[in-house]
Amino acid sequence: MKNLINVALRAAIDASKEVHKIYDEGFSVSIKEDKSPVTSGDLKSNEIITAYLKQTSIPILSEETDHESESVIAGWQKYWCVDPIDGTKEYVNKTGEYCISIGLLTSETSLLGVLAAPSLELFYFAAEGLGSYKWNGKYEDLYELLNEEDVTEKILEKSVKLPLKIDLKNYTILTSRSHYSSIDKEYIEKLRIQHPNLVMFQMGSAIKIGLVAEGKANEYARLSPINFWDIAGGHAIAKYAGLEIVDYETKKQITYKNFSTLKISGYIVRNI
């Protein structure tokens, strides 16, 4: 696992450097068949990340790469699951609320995860046997670690273990900026009965999972269906921080068995 987290960290750091540069200097945007946007930043990030992950000989499922058949994916014992830029709409709209997400999945769980949000200067990582962490140094210092042979050991020197204690005056919930629906609204209304002091913040991407793990919010609820690659990296951050993260529909721990759609019904993660 140590070699795998090393590779994933390098991939996320290298990709975030290029993604942030493209974000600042300008990018092209096109529309995919599913009507969602894709930018030159997404494609460059995908190129960089997959080049690193191919070194491990573990299969790769990426949002921006043609997918294998359902039967092939179902036969993988474990595989990399990548969103080169989660929150592409936020990338296009220049909110900064996007992140790079890399996870290592089995059909049952996420074994490893990295979330990197260069514009927000947030970087989280986790792995089985290692735990869950937030980088606590300057974001640009991460780029220097690409010259180190053992990235994991160097990054741990300036990282804090998650979860961090919640110390908030109000019950704070994060929700999606782009996918907020009537289901979310109804859930918030019910939650407000339990927590009259509730405050809600909307923002983009799975980086919200990291914010919950570090105690910046009590909860993040994403209640509409979501692709495997949107949750794979964040799932590990939450899991190895010891947080509760459940499938919204089944109310059980998230699994990755729906190979026909590569989606889960939505999820809730809490730090309480």
Image: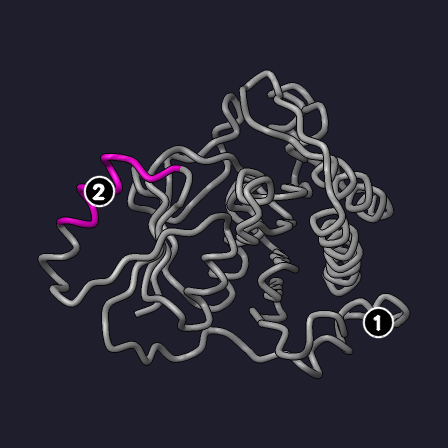
Q: Is residue 75 above or below residue 235?
A: above
Classify mark 2: residues with Cα within 10 Å, few (<14), some (14-19) or many (20+): few
Apparent side of residue 265 relative to residue 78 in the rendered image (left or right)? left
Q: Which of 174 and 264 is in front in this view?
A: 174
- Residue drawn at x 61%, y 56% is 113
Distance, label 2 to label 1, CA atoms, is 43 Å
Disc 1 packing (10 Å; few <14; some 14–19; many ≥20): few
In the rendered structure, which disc, 2 or 1, sits on the residue that comes first in sequence?
Answer: 1
For the point 70% across and 38% down, the residue is 42
Q: As drawn, is 48 to the left or to the right of 65?
A: right
Q: Mark 2 points at which residue?
A: 185
Count of residue discs: 2
Q: Which amino acid does label 1 sit on?
A: Glu
Picture coordinates of residue 68 (x, y %)?
69, 22
Q: Which residue lies furthest to the bottom in this view?
A: 157
* Amino acid type at image mark 2: Lys
Image x and y of residue 171, in percent: 24, 67
Residue 155 sits in quarter: bottom right
Which region shows up in magenta? Answer: 179-189
Disc 1: which residue: 144
Q: Confirm whether the magenta stretch covers residue 181.
A: yes
For the C terminus, give its image quadrant: bottom left
